[in-house]
Amino acid sequence: MRVALIGLGMVADTHVAAIRDASPQLTLHGVLGRTQDSTQAYAQKHATRGYASLDDLAGDSDVDFVILATPPDARLPVVQTLAAAGKPILMEKPIERDLATATQIVALCEQAKIPLGVVFQHRVRQASVALKEAIEAGDLGTIATVDLRVPWWRDQRYYDAPRRGTYARDGGGVMISQAIHTLDLAMWLLGPITSVQAMMRKTPLHSMEAEDWAGALFEMQNGAIGTMMATTAAYPGGAETITVQGTRASAHLGSGVLTLSRLDGTTEVFGATTSTGGGADPMAFTHAWHQSVIEDFARAIANSTPSPIPAAEALRTHAVIDAMQTASRTAHREKVHL
């Protein structure tokens, strides 16, 4: 299958490596960046086609699907053009800057009857899959409490990129740009969050518009209660973690390793330690997770089956972040509306 890539920023090389190593074989058929100079330079570097425009790409009948890796504020017009051309889309998170526009994009693709998937690569890690299987098998018993931690670090140079960390470009700060992965993973494992109380602030460690620290208390549909802390102001940065306490066992997920500690005293460990990009280098992680997501999306297109990580599920993370922003402004508990 032939893949086109739109958006040539820091995650582009990860997608190119994932396409290169994919099985069954995929081909990087062409790229499109913000300018023609950047497009042609990147195309030459990777021996592929550089498109002259979005219409040029959308009109290429050889393209089987498109990976969309632009900043969030550039998504809606791109999706409108691709949907009109019938091109399946696999996009980087988030879908857009806010819940309303993200919902509009999902509805647009549903109306056009084109597959739309989201790159939530933390779902495909071995330890994440093992935890989901344990929860579904009842190994943890009734889920009582959940704790989500994202103690990451980004230096100021990261936020010095034009408009990064602004509401107009990104839709917010650490929650929508970084912690969205942990939030999605928690709800994939345990189900929806139904209400939140939150505080979202900017610390003195960064000059930016949106928050670089967020804390929340939340309730889940399954009856569990939880806590969450996410920041890019925790030098030198550490791995994000999910800790789940059940009536039969607790589970701790972090750095690619799952530790199950049963109340009878026995312990099991799954996975292997790996970096997840929580330090100063945001790209310090393997492309294998993106590769798995891309392979699964390609197979779904080939077999005419639903997207493995459907965009409609990603709306849940937008809804929670939207509720957190409102709760932080009002100092009230907010229900999650979706």
Image: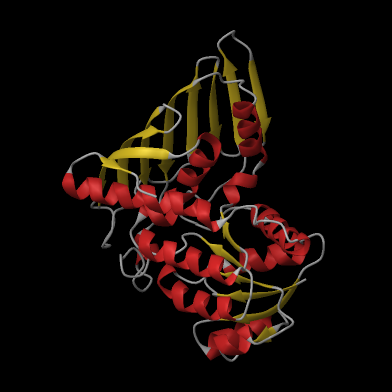
Compared to residue 261, the image places residue 211 above or below, namely below
| Place of residue 125 in the rendered image (x, y in percent of width and height, measured from the top left) | 64, 43
Which of the 4 image quadrants contains residue 147? Answer: top left
Compared to residue 255, the image places residue 59 above or below, namely below
Q: How is the image coloured?
A: secondary structure
Q: Quick one: which residue is furthest to the left in this view?
A: 330
Q: Quick one: which residue is furthest to the right in this view?
A: 24
Which of the 4 image quadrants contains residue 206? Answer: bottom left
- Is residue 160 among what the camera can see? yes
Q: Is residue 307 left or right of residue 227?
A: right
Q: Quadrant of the N terminus?
A: bottom right
Compared to residue 285, the image places residue 50 above or below, namely below
Query: Looking at this view, is 193 or 45 the one in front?
Result: 193
Q: Residue at x 62, y 85 (%)?
A: 57
Q: Is residue 144 left or right of residue 137?
A: left
| Place of residue 246 in the rendered image (x, y in percent of width and height, measured from the top left) | 50, 20
| Place of residue 27 in the rendered image (x, y in percent of width and height, measured from the top left) | 76, 73
| Place of residue 71 in the rendered image (x, y in percent of width and height, measured from the top left) | 45, 70
